Image (tube, rainbow, N blue to C red):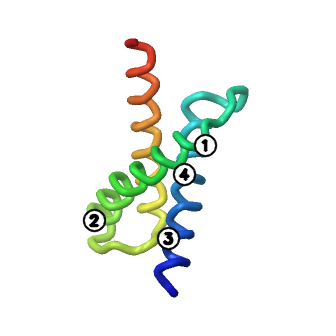
Amino acid sequence: MPWLSLLLFMLVFGMAIGWVAQLVVNGFDTRINWSEALITGLAGSFVGGIIGSLIFEGELRLRPSGIIGSIIGAILLVLLVNWVRRRR
């Protein structure tokens, strides 16, 4: 069952990336929305990680550029979510 461990790693990694993005954007004094952290982390990891890995490394592997790209992608998504909430 290697796919199960990969799925678990992706969920934990995505939530961690989303958590970091929420801390960067919203600051340390706000509560963490864990469901939003998971969604923005996974989507940010997908977008930022893939683009970062392909631009800087040329292949898909877990590297610092992919991790940085994941965080940047998740930060952009958290900013977008905050912007949409303010417009309502």
Which amino acid, mark 2?
Answer: Leu
Q: Is residue 87 left or right of residue 3?
A: left
Q: Is residue 14 above or below residue 79?
A: below
Task: Say whether disc 2 or disc 3 marks the residue closer to the N-terminus.
Answer: 3
Badge 3 local density, few (<14 within 10 Å), some, or many (20+)?
Answer: few
Which amino acid, mark 4?
Answer: Ile
Q: Residue at x 30, y 74 (%)?
A: 59
**Image marks 1 and 2: residues in contact by CB distance under 8 Å:** no
Q: CA distance from mark 1 to mark 4?
A: 11 Å
Q: Residue at x 41, y 49 (%)?
A: 44
Q: Is residue 85 above or below residue 12?
A: above
Task: Say whether disc 4 or disc 3 marks the residue closer to the N-terminus.
Answer: 3
Q: Is residue 27 left or right of residue 4?
A: right
Which amino acid, mark 1?
Answer: Trp
**Image marks 4 and 3: residues in contact by CB distance under 8 Å:** no
Q: Which mark is residue 34?
A: 1
Q: Position of residue 16 (x, y in %)?
A: 59, 53
Task: Say whether disc 1 or disc 2 marks the residue closer to the N-terminus.
Answer: 1
Q: CA distance from mark 4 to mark 3?
A: 15 Å
| Labels 1, 2: front one | 1
Q: Position of residue 67 (x, y in %)?
A: 48, 59
How many tags in the picture? Answer: 4
Q: Is residue 76 above or below residue 41?
A: above
Q: CA distance from mark 4 to mark 2?
A: 19 Å
Q: Secondary structure at mark 1?
A: helix
Q: CA distance from mark 2 to mark 3?
A: 22 Å
**Image marks 1 and 3: residues in contact by CB distance under 8 Å:** no
Q: Which residue is mark 3?
A: 7
| Labels 4, 3: front one | 3
Q: Which residue is mark 2?
A: 54
